[in-house]
Image (cartoon, rainbow, N blue to C red):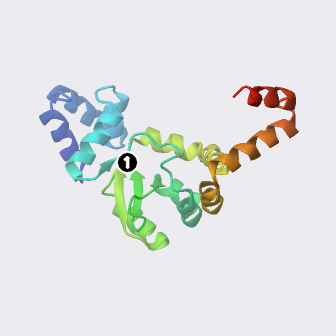
Amino acid sequence: MSSDAQLGELLVQRGLMSEAQLRTATDFQQQLGGDLRSIVVKLGYVKDAVIAGLVAQEEGVEASVEITPDVIDFDMIKTLGKETLEKHQVLPLKSSDGHSLVLAMADPNDLRAIEEIQFRANRSVEPAVTTKAALRRALNQLPDLMKQAEQRQGGRIPADRLKALRGTPIDKLMRAYLVLQVESGSLSLEDLLARASKL
């Protein structure tokens, strides 16, 4: 969807706006400037999330309205730099194939943004349409989102330790666990032995 005229036409065709509302929005646009999408959202005619879904459907790309720490590619943010993301109002998301780069953006036809990101990342870009508000919120909260992601990763068991855990017999793990509980004072040795004698 390359133009505001096409977006306006589509919104009317889908019954999301009336012809009168479209005329009002385009009058505002001529007087004040800006893009039609922002104007119809500000006028309260259509929610930004609805437009994002519609644009994604028309362009045949993914829609990503919610941007949470789980879906953001923080390694790619370090590669691209926050300035580039702010400049183009985009955010890299985790890719299912690990080769291409999923890029959350309000306008999937922003070729300047796509080309620059492809060049910097040295990967092909797959646009994922999102709302402008979700992008601004995520970019503004990026330091906090990075901390949340780091805290979650901190709780994960490294693969080699997980393998060792799975390879240890359960009876040995249970004995080790009970010894640790007794040594830390979380469990009374007398109570443990008394209970074991009743089994």
From the viewer's side, name the closer residue of 103 and 194: 194
Within 10 Å of disc 1 (Cα), the crowding (few <14, some 14-19, many 20+) is many
Q: Position of residue 186 (x, y in %)?
A: 82, 31
Q: Give the residue drawn at x 53%, y 62%.
A: 76
Q: Position of residue 50 (x, y in %)?
A: 29, 35
According to the image, label 1 marks what residue?
106
Is 18 situated left or right of 93 in this image? left
From the viewer's side, name the closer residue of 92 and 25: 92
Q: Give the residue drawn at x 20%, y 32%.
A: 23
From the viewer's side, name the closer residue of 46 and 20: 46
Image-quadrant location for residue 83: bottom right
Image-quadrant location for residue 33: top left
Total marks drawn? Answer: 1
Q: Amino acid at mark 1?
A: Ala
Is 26 situated left or right of 168 in this image? left
Q: Position of residue 140 (x, y in %)?
A: 58, 43
Image-quadrant location for residue 12: top left
Q: Position of residue 185 (x, y in %)?
A: 87, 33
Residue 50 visible (yes or no):
yes
Which type of secondary structure does the marked residue at label 1 adopt? Answer: loop
Locate the C terminus by quadrant.
top right
Is 119 situated left or right of 183 in this image? left
Q: Is residue 185 above or below residue 100?
A: above
Residue 36 visible (yes or no):
no
Q: Residue furthest left?
A: 13
Q: Give the residue drawn at x 31%, y 33%.
A: 40
Q: Is residue 127 above or below residue 25?
A: below
